[in-house]
């Protein structure tokens, strides 16, 4: 695994490139981020951001989502893909938030993952962005790039990657680090044809070193 010194250099370099480390999903209410993350499965954040304004205008409150017909919700999110399942999860999630959590997004991993359509990736993001807790969000970018860098062992299993990142990345850095992985994955370390030449992390990247 990568040395602590190398991991620290990677973290600090990414901070310099992406100082804000913001989530690219747009939202105003806590539950809107929860729903947006569900919509982002097998879909781009850009597409989700195009869809949600009309969705939230039609269903402006958590109560309106809880009372909604999933079929109607599905029509608003059709372009996000897998819209029937996502619509059912959103409506079911809204009902659970009202019935079991007083209309608030809960703040523990166990509570969050008990909600329809919410797995550990979503829960970690919510814990980090909404509650300021540690959040190891193992999406495709994070899994791919940390494997290439050698921070993780190249596993494609999100839970295994999360366990390895918890050993390598300090909790206080975790949420922003994972956001920066997404940004870096879009800009430089792309799934196809990564820009290894001139990459600011090349000096600490196992994959880049192997190509020399």
Image (cartoon, rainbow, N blue to C red):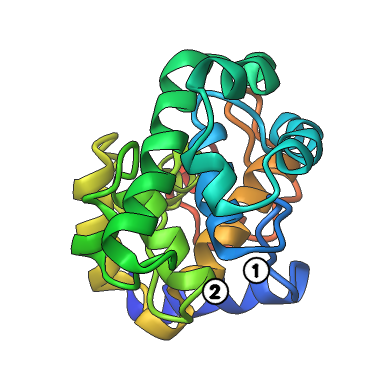
The reply, left or right, for residue 163 in relation to residue 15 is left
Mark 2 touches mark 1? (CB < 8 Å) = yes
Q: Position of residue 193 (x, y in %)?
A: 66, 25
Please tell me which residue lies in front, 138 or 35: 35
Residue in the picture at 53% in, 67% down = 177
Quarter holding residue 18:
bottom right
Q: Which mark is residue 186?
A: none
Q: Position of residue 53 (x, y in %)?
A: 80, 41
| Residue 157 showing in the rendered view | yes
Residue plotted at (43% across, 85% down): 172
Q: Quadrant of the C terminus?
A: top right
Residue at the spot of label 2: 11
Q: Classify residue 72 by image quadrant.
A: top right
Closer to the camera in the image, 188 or 6? 188
- Find residue 2 and report its horizontal and vertical position in percent: 33, 65
| Label 1: which secondary element | helix
Depth check: give the residue in front, 122 or 209.
122
On the image, the x and y values in percent for residue 5 come to 42, 81
Residue corresponding to mark 1 = 14
């Amino acid at each position: 695994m990568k040395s602590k010194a190398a991991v620290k250099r990677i973290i600090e370099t990414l901070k310099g490139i992406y100082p804000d480390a913001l989530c690219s999903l747009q939202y105003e209410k806590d539950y809107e981020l929860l729903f947006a993350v569900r919509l982002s499965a097998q879909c781009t954040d850009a597409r989700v951001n195009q869809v949600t304004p009309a969705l939230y205008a039609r269903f402006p409150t958590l109560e309106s989502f809880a009372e909604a017909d999933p079929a109607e919700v599905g029509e608003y999110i059709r372009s996000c893909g897998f819209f029937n399942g996502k619509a059912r999860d959103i409506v079911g999630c809204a009902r659970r938030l009202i019935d079991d959590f007083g209309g608030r997004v809960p703040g523990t991993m166990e509570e969050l993952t008990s909600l329809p359509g919410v797995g550990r990736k979503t829960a970690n993001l919510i814990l980090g962005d909404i509650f300021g807790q540690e959040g190891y969000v193992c999406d495709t970018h994070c899994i791919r790039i940390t494997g290439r860098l050698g921070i993780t062992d190249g596993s494609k299993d999100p839970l295994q990657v999360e366990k390895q990142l918890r050993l390598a990345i300090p909790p206080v850095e975790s949420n922003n680090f994972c956001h920066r992985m997404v940004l870096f994955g879009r800009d430089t370390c792309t799934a196809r044809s990564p820009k290894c030449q001139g990459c600011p992390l090349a000096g600490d990247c196992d994959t880049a070193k192997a190509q020399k």
